[in-house]
Image (cartoon, coloured by chain):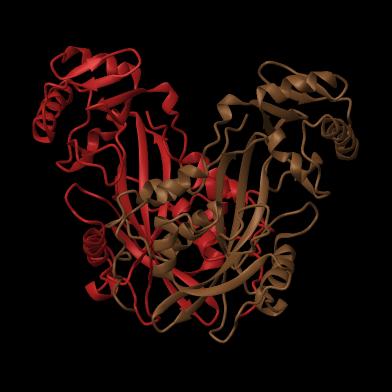
Chain colours: A red, B brown
Amino acid sequence: MTPYAPGLNLSPIMSFLDHIRACNNGDPSRYRPFLIGGRRVGFLRPAFAELLRSFPDIFQVGTDRVTLSPDLSGPDERSAAVADVGRRLVAAGILPKPRGESLRVAEGWGAPTLMVLERKFISYFGVAAYGVHVNGFVRTARGLSLWIGTRAQDKDVAPGKLDNMIAGGLPAGLGLMDNLVKEAGEEADVPQALARTARPAGIVSYVMEDEGGLKPDTLFVYDLEVPEDFTPRNTDGETAFFTLMDVSEVARRVRDSRDFKFNVTLVITDFLIRHGLLSPETEPDYAEIACGLRRSLPAR
Amino acid sequence: MTPYAPGLNLSPIMSFLDHIRACNNGDPSRYRPFLIGGRRVGFLRPAFAELLRSFPDIFQVGTDRVTLSPDLSGPDERSAAVADVGRRLVAAGILPKPRGESLRVAEGWGAPTLMVLERKFISYFGVAAYGVHVNGFVRTARGLSLWIGTRAQDKDVAPGKLDNMIAGGLPAGLGLMDNLVKEAGEEADVPQALARTARPAGIVSYVMEDEGGLKPDTLFVYDLEVPEDFTPRNTDGETAFFTLMDVSEVARRVRDSRDFKFNVTLVITDFLIRHGLLSPETEPDYAEIACGLRRSLPAR
């Protein structure tokens, strides 16, 4: 029960809001909603929507929305039809080569699966993707420290950048905790029993734009307290090495540099807020930061 | 380091989302933005905006916005001019009787004060209000318990409803922690030294509508762990009594009843999420709930 010492003493170079804005460069109003069975599941760039007029049996392309044909009656039939269109658009050089990993398409987390879609195509269809990020931390006499990974130089996305101890996308069909335990083992050599003590602590969401289109991402955030004598060790080659950093050092580098992977800055900002390490009395943007960490899309 | 047992075992009657929706019945698109010095500080109901045409020296009333006269050069002059209009509208039976308590009007938390406004008028001008809510909790061998207050029967707002251990609006000119310490003493007889161990843990925000107009509220959320032998005791007559409740009982009553004051349901839902007591694996609306706890207004 030590009195709360408001905030960390940081000299501002950048703002936490700068990182939030960088992750929210997508503007859904410039896209056409994509519907399946009357439910909005994505957003299409108008130029990509127009291309889909070549497949009138599969897509009903309007100027205000694109609807998957209601003749496709269930998830399997829809997935197969869209995968077939995908193959033709890959052959035509319009869509990128698939990775062979499918994501669930639904109206929201917890809503029924309407179809599955190749991961490499999701931004073209503006379909929401989900991930799991785990803040691995140690409680020491001097305060909290975080285990921070440095991403391997050969990663496609953000090579060499700093990352959470454990993080990964959610493939279709694998539960959150099962995914967390699997990634914890591969990425940081965390024993199963320890990984299962991770606690869900909320979400972080943002809407980016990439070369394909809109990328609405939702990250399920977990905190995992590890003992002082535990050291993470990468086993899958995705992380070059791990460093144990004081939370004040982490906060400084998150805010004032681009050393961290873009979306990890948001996960750690959320950690700082939840653990009382940012203060509304010393951080003028506190309310805007807290709101900015969770961006939701218009319902229709 | 016990394995995480996903979620509490609750049989659903209502949804956490029902309470979030009830607090978000306000639709800013049906209001006219209210600007001071080019900055959006509020929202006016069109009928109220039209009334302000009677004061052309003070308000420039347009069909798409209402602007405070730029001839009013600083916070003091603006506050005095609007207070004078307020007195006339109270005399005309249009505005309610003032309480004699002023709130800061600004573009956002941490932005410079543009004027102050009587608390009873704020929804007519759609100006954001801020509050402090403190989750008072005890860590026991069986898990977390929360100290829950029952509001006095003679309260104007939500008499007899359940409430956080400490909660209050933020008057102009008092800092967050100073306000928290003052309210903690008056509402729950918390010693200063204990009150100062409260940790900021984020915000909850929502946009309601009342008889006056729009009410955008931001609540700064704090967690205060109290020792098992501490018992809160009300000293200002605002709380009838306090009860120590298991967190699972609190969760059940928050979700499945209207026993709690409307906005306290959101503060406690946020507590459940932050402490890992709701699981994204068992709560299908998890992402929507987490996003719904923080609603922000359009910037202009």
Q: Residue furthest front?
A: B153
Q: How many labels does the image show?
A: 0
Above or below A299: residue A94: above
Q: In the picture, which quadrant includes the C terminus of chain A?
A: top left
Q: Quadrant of residue A201?
A: bottom left
Q: Where is residue B248 in the image (x, y as percent from the top left)?
A: 39, 68
Above or below A291: residue A249: below
Above or below B244: residue B88: above
The reply to whether residue A158 is visible in this rendering is no
In this rendered view, identify the residue nearer to me: B233 or A103: B233
| Residue shown at the point (87%, 31%) measured from the top left | B88
Q: Position of residue A149 (x, y in %)?
A: 37, 62
Above or below B9: residue B285: above
Q: Position of residue B276 (x, y in %)?
A: 39, 65
A124 relative position to A210: left or right: left
| Residue shown at the point (66%, 54%) measured from the top left | B131
A271 relative position to B60: left or right: left
Q: Quadrant of residue A277?
A: bottom right
Q: Where is residue A253 in the image (x, y as percent from the top left)?
A: 53, 57
The reply to whether residue B220 is visible in this rendering is yes
B218 relative position to B172: left or right: left
| Residue shown at the point (38%, 23%) measured from the top left | A31
In this rendered view, identify the residue nearer to me: A233 or A110: A110
In this rendered view, identify the residue nearer to me: A52 or A58: A58
Q: In the picture, which quadrant includes the N terminus of chain A?
A: bottom right
A234 relative position to B21: left or right: left
| Residue shown at the point (68%, 34%) measured from the top left | B42
